[in-house]
């Protein structure tokens, strides 16, 4: 008769027996937490913690508020002001499409559109061409490739205004240490020009400084694409007898399609909205030979006080950049699939 309680006690203490320690653990999980000293605590004294975890969307709200105040509100306000005669201060009146009609009749604005397109075309072609050549060069197995990458990329991190002032010094026709001085020292004095003062050369001189600054940026993107090309493909092509040009044409170039898409998109958008270098180097001159849409809208707002008209120009520029970018992106994405 006395052996039954002893057996039950041994079952409860043995974790290998059914109904032993497992039942005790189940009781603890059900809320009967053991008190200090091993005695189970009363169920009514169990402490319950309330879940205070924030929902995921709560972490996005601060960033959205900042974005709305800094970007969305000014953008929407600019769309509204494009249809007004606002001068920057005081009241304004809605004028409908008058600002856009003025834009179509403004010879200076129309010339700036032509200049913007020519500048963008030059920057896109030359910058990406030089960037690709630099990437191919520093991707080779040479000892100084790390140093060359730093040197070529360094101008991209310099302020565009600083670059413009640097190149104004280089372009200064009276500077013996500038471009004209170098040409004279090389016996090419006949090529010396007033690079920023000549209406036929000012725009291309600005394009040259933009290419100098951002060719290294394009190089880095192309270099990332080159390092993603499997070495086995080049080795297989070399074994099949493919030369250097053939390996580049049929192996490297198709696999560079994503990098080319990024570079073309960035350089096109940057060229269409180019302002800093143009304004700091030539102020749109001489005359209107280097005016761009960005410099026109700036002068209309802050020089002539026509904020309503300037926002209309800005709206046209934004829509133009968006349209060109979407068409370009669609074509380049399709090229990536077929490459």
Image: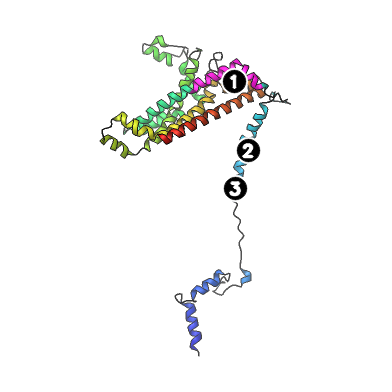
Does 204 sit above or below residue 253?
A: above
Report x, y in % for residue 107: 59, 15
Does 4 sit above or below residue 335?
A: below
Magenta span dominant secondary structure: helix
- Residue drawn at x 30%, y 30% as measured from the top left: 244
Disc 2 vs disc 3: Cβ atoms closer than 8 Å?
Answer: no
- Residue drawn at x 62%, y 16% as measured from the top left: 105
Assess whether residue 320 is covered by the magenta stretch: no
Q: Which mark is residue 259?
A: none
- Secondary element at image label 1: helix
Distance in Å between CA atoms under marks 3 and 1? 41 Å
Q: Which residue is mark 2?
A: 68
Report x, y in % for residue 58: 61, 48
- The mark nearer the N terminus, 3 or 1, is 3
Q: Is residue 163 visible?
A: yes
Count of numbered labels shown in the rendering: 3
Distance in Å between CA atoms under marks 2 and 1? 27 Å
Q: Residues within 10 Å of mark 3 (few under 14, many from 20)?
A: few
Q: Which mark is residue 296?
A: 1
- Residue drawn at x 43%, y 31% as measured from the top left: 260
Q: Which residue is mark 3?
A: 57
Q: Nearer the viewer, residue 190 or 91?
A: 91
| Residue 291 location, quadrant | top right
Q: Residues within 10 Å of mark 2 (few under 14, many from 20)?
A: few
Distance in Å between CA atoms under marks 2 and 3? 16 Å
Q: Nearer the viewer, residue 34 or 305?
A: 305
- Secondary element at image label 3: helix
User: In the image, which residues are magenta?
Assistant: 99-120
- The mark nearer the N terminus, 2 or 1, is 2
């Amino acid at each position: 008769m006395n052996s039954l309680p002893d057996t039950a006690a041994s079952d409860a203490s043995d974790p290998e027996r059914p109904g032993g320690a497992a039942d005790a653990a189940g009781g603890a999980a059900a809320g009967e937490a053991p008190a200090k000293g091993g005695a189970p605590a009363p169920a009514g004294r169990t402490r319950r913690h309330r879940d205070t975890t924030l929902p995921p969307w709560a972490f996005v709200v601060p960033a959205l508020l900042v974005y709305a105040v800094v970007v969305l509100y000014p953008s929407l306000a600019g769309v509204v002001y494009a249809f007004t005669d606002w001068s920057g201060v005081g009241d304004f009146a809605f004028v409908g499409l008058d600002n856009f009609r003025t834009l179509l009749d403004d010879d200076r604005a129309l010339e700036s559109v032509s200049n913007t397109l020519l500048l963008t075309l030059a920057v896109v072609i030359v910058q990406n061409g030089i960037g690709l050549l630099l990437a191919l060069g520093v991707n080779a197995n040479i000892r100084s490739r790390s140093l060359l990458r730093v040197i070529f990329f360094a101008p991209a991190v310099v302020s565009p205004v600083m670059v413009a002032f640097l190149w104004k010094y280089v372009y200064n026709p009276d500077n013996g240490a500038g471009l004209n001085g170098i040409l004279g020292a090389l016996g090419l004095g006949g090529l010396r020009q007033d690079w920023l003062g000549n209406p036929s050369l000012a725009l291309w001189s600005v394009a040259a400084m933009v290419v100098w600054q951002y060719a290294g940026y394009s190089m880095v993107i192309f270099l990332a694409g080159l390092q993603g090309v499997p070495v086995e493909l080049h080795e297989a092509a070399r074994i099949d007898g493919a030369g250097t040009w053939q390996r580049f044409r049929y192996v490297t170039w198709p696999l560079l399609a994503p990098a080319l898409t990024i570079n073309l998109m960035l350089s096109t958008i940057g060229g269409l909205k180019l302002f800093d270098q143009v304004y700091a180097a030539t102020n749109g001159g001489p005359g209107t030979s280097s005016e761009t849409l960005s410099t026109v809208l700036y002068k209309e707002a802050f020089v002539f006080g026509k904020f309503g008209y300037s926002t209309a120009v800005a709206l046209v520029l934004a829509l133009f950049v968006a349209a060109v970018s979407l068409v370009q992106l669609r074509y380049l994405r399709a090229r990536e699939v077929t490459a």
